Image: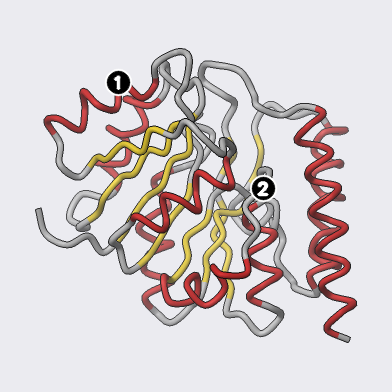
Amino acid sequence: MPKPLLSVVIPTYNEAANIAVLIERLSAALRGVPHEIIVADDDSPDRTWEIVEGISAARPEVRLLRRRRDRGLYPAVAEAFASSSGRWLAVMDADLQHDERILPAMLETLRQGRDLVVGSRHAAGGGIEDWNIFRRLLSRIGNSLVAVLLGMSVRDPLSGFFMIDRQAYERIAPKLRPRGFKILMDILGLLGADARVSEIGYVFKPRRAGASKLGAKVAFEFMLALWETAARRLARR
């Protein structure tokens, strides 16, 4: 297997119904691009990890990280990034809500000298299916608030779908505090307002199967992350 240009990290918990479908879609979208797919699974009770083990036995580009400690999306991504080999690093969810077809465009944008590319629900060409007006409004308000706190003109800083240059990531990795879900917000805050960030729009799809991981704990961790982002920006002044 040639050295991958791109490492795609998929953090999972109870995504047995989706993971094989996503891996097939990724393989189709990235045909011709040397890549690896790292599934960082938090020892899912539905045995998502077992499905990935079976796939990886036949496909060397697919690799499993079965995690039994320090569970959570953010620490899963950080661990997978540390074990990856690609020149560029991508993150996406396993629930088939992100559009893997924009990955080649994200990669091409990074190769033109950007630090980070966001798969954006709110950029040109983006959108959200099956959300009511109230939920769409909350998303807009939340993203706008975070953008103001970051001091950046990013439309979707709460996206869970992004790609980053390894060198840019390694500059800030020692300062990351892996906790909760909003890794992109933390990365943007550490990269700073001078970072070269682009957004590529995509349509956010309804969840195909399984249950959302959002809940009171996630909401609390998000509020804590907002507070830390605000404190970081004040400290820079």
Question: Residue lying farthest top?
Answer: 46
| Rendered position, 173 above or below 146 | below
At x 50% / y 70%, what residue is drawn?
169
Picture residue at 42% right of the left edge, 22% below the top: 18
Residue 190: name its quadrant. Answer: bottom right
- Quadrant of the drawing holding the C terminus: bottom right
Question: Badge 2: how crowded within 10 Å, few (<14), some, or many (20+)?
Answer: some
Q: Is residue 115 left or right of residue 204?
A: left
Q: Is residue 171 above or below residue 201?
A: below
Up-down relation of residue 208 to residue 35 (above or below): above
Left or right: 52 as drawn, with respect to 146: left
Could you give the CA–CA distance between mark 2 and mark 1, rounded to whole angstroms?
26 Å
Q: Amino acid at mark 1?
A: Ile
Element carrying mark 2: loop
Q: Which residue is mark 1?
A: 51
- Please tell me which residue lies in front, 66 or 166: 66
Instruction: Check disc 2 and report the residue beneath it.
Output: 179
Whole-percent x and y of residue 89? 41, 60
Mark number displayed over residue 33: none
Question: Is 83 positioned to the left or the right of 234 in the image?
Answer: left
